[in-house]
Image (spheres, rainbow, N blue to C red):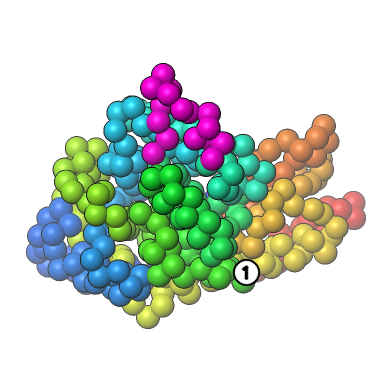
Amino acid sequence: MYSFNNDYSEGAHPKILEAMIQANLIQNGGYGLDEHCSHARELIRKEIGQIDSDIHFITGGTQTNLITIAAALRPWQAVISTDKGHINVHETGAIEATGHKVIAMPSNDGKLTPADILKALEDHTTEHMVQPKMVYISNSTEIGTQYTKAELESLHHICRQKNLYLFLDGARLGSALTSPINDVTLSDIAKLTDAFYIGGTKNGALFGEALIILNKDLKQDLRFLIKQRGAMMAKGWLLGIQFEELFQNNLFFDLAAHANEMATLLRDGISSCGFSFYSDSTTNQLFPIFPDKLIEKLERDFLFSIQERFDDNHSAIRLVTSWATKEEACREFIKTLKANIQE
């Protein structure tokens, strides 16, 4: 059975594994204070155009989110997210475990708007309520949609106006940046956010995320917090090596573009069969709406997840492509889909 269940079913791109093997018997400094991490930081700073940014390499997305949010908020403060936000749905209450509330705003397209932020502020006005202090967004979002530059600028403006931090979850940032409708660059994101991270786990790395801190108020003592939360790897150079490779020779963008191209194959084939989608995604996550009986047939040959019940007889499924997804697997899915429709 071929899996479209997620974008981290495979290990790492061969160039990354080769680099790790070559460095395997070479001694390095620990805890991210090594030459590989230093070089990777230089490469990322050059890419984002922010020489004075602080960059920390952390093993996973949940740890990156909780560390950044914990660093930004005082004990009585909260973070604003959409109701579909990863910190609200898929992190087992990690943010709440740090003592902070997630203010979840309803969203049909997975994106947060200035109006949502204003509504959250209007609903939390006294010392008897948590105080909103940070805005959390994902790009691409949890349902595959993405922010335009104009939308990010609007969020940046309202956050500055209301003295809020803006934090962007970039677990699938590569997919957003290489989407055919994208008009945002890494440099734009660095100018419009206080902190964001570049996801490696879901884009060809064995594991790891690169957290970029732009706002000087969030920089102080962050390594203490990373260590306290159990996210500081002794063998931190293993993270540095991976981001060195990802940000040389355009590898990060090439891998993400491949995932999007494979998703386009699936999207076009599904659309040609007359099916609609739960969200308007042009990234590597697709959410086609199929009859439940058809889903049962597809499950014989492919792995995927059910996103949401659509009605009594239909559900939206989630198909995810990756840097390693094979073109023949996508074509086989469409072939199987058409064959089951004709039965």
**Quick one: 285 or 67, which is closer to the camera?**
67
State left or right for residue 286 relative to residue 55: right
Task: Report the number of discs.
Answer: 1
Q: Which residue is depicted at the point 34% across and 41% down?
A: 69
Would you say residue 269 is visible in this rendering? yes
Q: Which residue is depicted at the point 72% across and 48% down?
A: 278
* Residue to which mark 1 is pinned: 181
Q: Position of residue 253 (x, y in %)?
A: 46, 72
Q: Amino acid at mark 1?
A: Ile
In the image, is residue 243 above or below residue 115? below
**Quick one: 78 or 94, which is closer to the camera?**
78
In the image, is residue 182 above or below residue 156? below
- Residue 28 located within the stretch drawn in magenta: no
**Quick one: 23 or 55, which is closer to the camera?**
55
Q: Quadrant of residue 105?
A: top right
Q: Position of residue 211 (x, y in %)?
A: 32, 55
State left or right for residue 302 relative to residue 297: left
What is the crowding at mark 1: few (fewer than 14 residues within 10 Å), some, or many (at least 20)?
A: few
Q: Which residue is depicted at the point 43% across and 24% down?
A: 126
State left or right for residue 174 relative to residue 115: left
Q: Position of residue 121 (x, y in %)?
A: 49, 35
- Please tell me whether mark 1 sits on a helix, a strand or a loop: loop
Would you say residue 207 is visible in this rendering? no
State left or right for residue 112 relative to residue 11: right
- Residue 119 located within the stretch drawn in magenta: yes
Q: Which residue is depicted at the point 75% across and 66% down?
A: 268
Q: Which residues are magenta?
A: 118-133
Q: Position of residue 199 (x, y in %)?
A: 40, 57
Farthest top residue? Answer: 128
